[in-house]
Each structure stands twice: as C-alpha cells, then as structure tokens.
Image (cartoon, grey):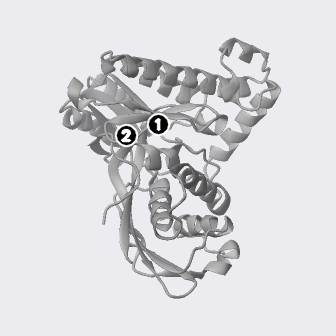
Amino acid sequence: MTGTWSAPGRVNVIGEHTDYNGGLSLPIAIPQHVDCTLTPRDDETVRVVSKQHGRDWVEVPLDRLADTDIVSWARYPLGVVHEFVKRGNDIHGMDLRLDGDVPVGAGLSSSAAVECAVAAAIRDTFATELPDSELVDITHRAENDFVGAPTGLLDQSASILCTAGHALFLDAATGAHTQVPFDLAAAGLELVVIDTGTRHNHVTSEYAIRRHQCQTAASLLEVHSLGAVIDAGVLDTVADPMLRARARHVVTENARVREVVTILQSGRDPRSIGPILTRGHGSLRDDFEVSTPQLDAAVEAASDSGAHGARMTGGGFGGSVIALAEADSSVRIGKAVAQHFSAQDWPTPQVFVVTPSDGARRIR
C-alpha cells in the first residue's frame, strides 16, 4: 500500500566536526523537509524520481545495487535501499517519489533528509521491527559507504531522533542522546538561518582531509578519538601547529556543547548561549579553517545587527549561518547581510527563521 513519509533537515546549534571525532553536538530538526512516497512493486526493481531533479525515473534491479555506477542525486536514496538489502532485510521492489524544500548544499542536511525519509518508508513497509537506532546506522552507512561522503552520524541522528521544541544532545561516541528544551519563542527569541548561497559538497570538499587530520592528531595523543580528550592542555604535546589547531577546535567545541546544554537545562536565559555560538564560529574559522568569506561576513553582519550570537552551521566550505536574535529580527538581519553581500558583489542570501521540529515520521 502506498504511503508518504517525511524527514527534516537540521540546524546544528553547537558542536561542529565533533561527531566523527566521538564528540558532542546539539542539533535541532527544522521545518524544511523531504517527503518520500513509497509504492511497493510486484517485481525486484527499485525506481526513484525526485521533483527537484527532473521527471526521469532512475531504475536499478535490487540485486544490482551493489555495483551500480550511478553517480547522480539518486545515489543517496539507492544507498539506503542497498543498506537494507545488505543487512538481510526482506526487501522487495518499490517506487520512491521524492519532493522537498531543504536547500541543497546549504549546510542544512538535505542529503540526510532524503536518506531518512526513504529509510523510514522502507522500515515501516518491509521491516517494521527495526528500531530508530538502526535507521540512524543504516542511513549513516549509506552516506559513508555507498555515496562516499565521510560524514559523522550527526545529520541522520537529528533527522530521525529530534522532537519538536527540543534540541538533541548527542554523544557520538556512545549514541546516547537526550532531548533538551529549546523553546526560543517563549523567551522572545528566534533562530535565524542565513543561506549564503555558496554551495558545498562533502564528497568533493576538504571534509575528508579534516577528518584524516583529526585521526592523525588522535593517534599522536594516543587516544581512539579526539572526543576522549577533555583537558586542552595536553594538546601542547602535538608538535605540528596545524594538527594542534584541528584538535583544539574539537576539544574546545565539545566544551562549548557542554556549556550550552548546562545553560538550557538549568532554565537560564537562552540569550546567554549567544557568545558561545560566536566563539564556536571563531574556532571553525581559525583552528579548523572550514569557513568562507561569505560565512564570516554573514556572522559579522548578523552580530552588528543585534544578534546575541552567530556561527556557521554544517560542515563548512560554504552553506549557512545561524543567528540567535530577538523575535521579529530576521528582516533587519537579512537586510544587513544583503547590504554587506551586495558591496562584495555576492548573490543575495536567503534568510528565514527555523523552529525545533519533529524527526522522521509517516504523514499519510
């Protein structure tokens, strides 16, 4: 029987490039989402089509998924199907129709939204016993192994596990997670997203290089991953200044996540997390070197326009900035950023407000 499932994009409030280092992060699901309509077939073929990528179906027999040479957008949903099959689930032919409004390449996890919508649809249709934790692993492995993007599990965890009105406090080392209240509207605040229009691709960007640098630094520190390092003082033993900077970002970013979570869980004014967000951007810019002139300009313009804090969100090398601001500030912030971009002859950024939303679910 045909059904439709929806999975959201995400904004990471704090905790960037920590997940693949066994560290901490604090994402929210956003209202922008991808819908997947699944119709079972009476053969062993999977077909997929996306409203955002034309009207042509991509068709692959289930037993040929492992060696398909498809390199387009379709690799994301097909990778999820392949991962279900590889794990021995009783999967049969299906048509997958995709449609969504998560901006592609904006650092808002459009790829994870696709993967998680497809995974939820397949689970509920063919493998109802699978828990959400396995859906996170299936979609994460699909992106790593089938697509070839060396990301952590933050994006898929957020798209599946987040709940409305909360941020997800995630420990990537263990998979443990806690819902943290994040009702900005009640405090007279809003979270503004500034999509700079500079696109990134984790398959082709320097993302994999950063991950390798972190692994090298962890080896020098004789730990399994940088998430195991609590005391930043031990980083002085890393002689290479570049590797030391990469490790310093991860260690201090984990500390920033803990600091933000403590504030939110204590019921203190969430405005006080703003400077922590801004410090996080400085670390991503200077120590991890994944920011861009457009991202830096958006952070500066938002801060100058009264935002309590701002930072790039996502893996970097393009994408979006978030700004914590008073309610009804998005228009003013958007105008300020647009003026700054116009002076540099950059495209006008897209600005919108997001609220913490629910994770993947069936909608009809």
Q: Position of residue 223 (x, y in %)?
A: 77, 27
Q: Residue furthest left?
A: 328
Q: CA distance from mark 2 to mark 1?
A: 10 Å
186 is higher (above) or lower (below) than 356: above
Residue depicted at x 69% and y 43%: 209
Amino acid under disc 2: Gln
Q: Which residue is most to the bottom? A: 42
Whether residue 79 is visible here, answered yes or no, is yes
Q: Are marks 2 and 1 in contact (CB under 8 Å)?
A: yes
Task: Give SS at disc 2.
Answer: loop
Q: Is residue 284 left or right of residue 217?
A: left
Q: Nearer the viewer, residue 304 or 42?
A: 42
Note whether residue 345 is visible.
no
Disc 2 or disc 1, which is closer to the eye? 1
Q: Quadrant of residue 191?
A: top left
Residue 191 vertical placement versus 94 (above, below): above
Of residues 210 and 102, the one drawn nearer to the viewer in this rendering? 102
Residue position marked by numbered label 2 in the rendering:
344
- Residue type at tag 1: Pro
Q: Quadrant of the N terminus?
A: bottom left
Q: Name the residue rendered at 49%, 79% in the picture.
A: 94
- The residue under the point 37% across, 40% down is 344
Relative horizontal placement of residue 356, taking residue 145 as reference (left or right): left
Q: Classify mark 1: helix, strand or loop.
A: helix
Q: For residue 328, which numbered disc appears in the image?
A: none
Residue 293, disc: 1
Tell me where residue 98 appears, x and y as whole percent.
40, 69
Image position of 254 (left or right of 262) = right
